[in-house]
Image: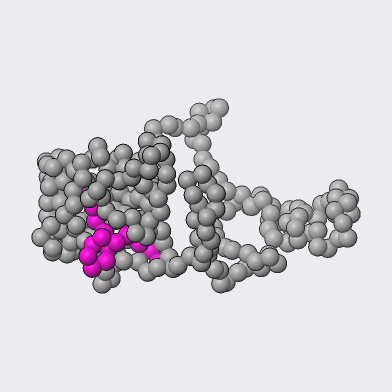
Amino acid sequence: MRTINMTNEKKRDAQVCMEAVKKPSGIRRVLADGGEYTNIKVLKQNLPLACETLSQNYTDLRQLGEEIIVGDPEIDMEIIGKKITETQKLYLDQNRKIAYRVNMTQIIKDPQGQEKERRDLAKALSNVTGESIVQWSGKRFPKKEIIRKFVFQRKLQLKHISGLTYDFLYDMAKSLQESDSMMFVGGGKKGNGPLILTQGGEPYRGFLEGRIQGETYCLILHLTNMEVRLQDGAGAKEGMPSKDGARSKDEVS
């Protein structure tokens, strides 16, 4: 489970856990006979059997097509159709070899989707763990206002790891519920910078939402890198956190 360092409104910091919680679907799929429905992955082909690789061994595609009809060189009965349990994403170069060093490019687009700029993607370091601390800014925004100004891409639930951190997070959730607001939290010394969860990851602005029920609490970190704007160019109201390091997207509200 991943961790995050946070401060509260008293500027006291603590390390707590964070995780993405997926709500299970209420739809249950079954087969025609009522049996359980299960998804599996099977191997379709490997690199030596791919058409791009086979085409290099023949003079033209017509010859390759005739060879496929006669000898089925694109099929290996020993491996095709095998079940796959774990996979790992790899990048290939133009020769279909594993690329061990990859330079990522960031493409900036305008509201109409046209490319404006292309530049090397900076691999920023994470600023939520180690010596970095996510700051409680003290800037509260009504929930009704926040949901009309930003598009939230991710949600992470914060959890305690001890009795002390339970009190730490419970008090946060209680304060936010009583004010019916969400709290902006940011990175950097001043607490107004974007949050970067992993090295080279996407920069986000973070907003905390809290709820309590009896002695239980729910503290959710909402993450966004898109700001909703009106056609006339009006954006977030004055007092909204800076979007430095995060993308914006013009949309009709």
Residue 52 figure quarter: bottom right
Residue range corresponding to the magenta coloring: 183-199
Image: 228 above or below 46: above
- The residue sitting at 22% across, 50% down in the picture is 239
- Is residue 30 in the magenta section? no
- The residue sitting at 56% across, 72% down in the picture is 101
Q: Is residue 238 left or right of residue 101?
A: left
Q: Is residue 106 left or right of residue 52?
A: left
Image: 14 above or below 177: below
Instruction: Name the one closer to the observer, 253 or 154.
Output: 253
Instruction: Name the one closer to the observer, 147 or 233.
Output: 233
- The residue sitting at 34% across, 42% down in the picture is 234
* Percent of width and height locating residue 235: 33, 45
Instruction: Name the one closer to the observer, 186 or 252.
Output: 252
- The residue sitting at 83% across, 63% down in the picture is 57
Main SS category, magenta section: loop
- Is residue 196 in the magenta section? yes
Q: Return the residue found at the far front.
A: 232
* Percent of width and height locating residue 73: 80, 55
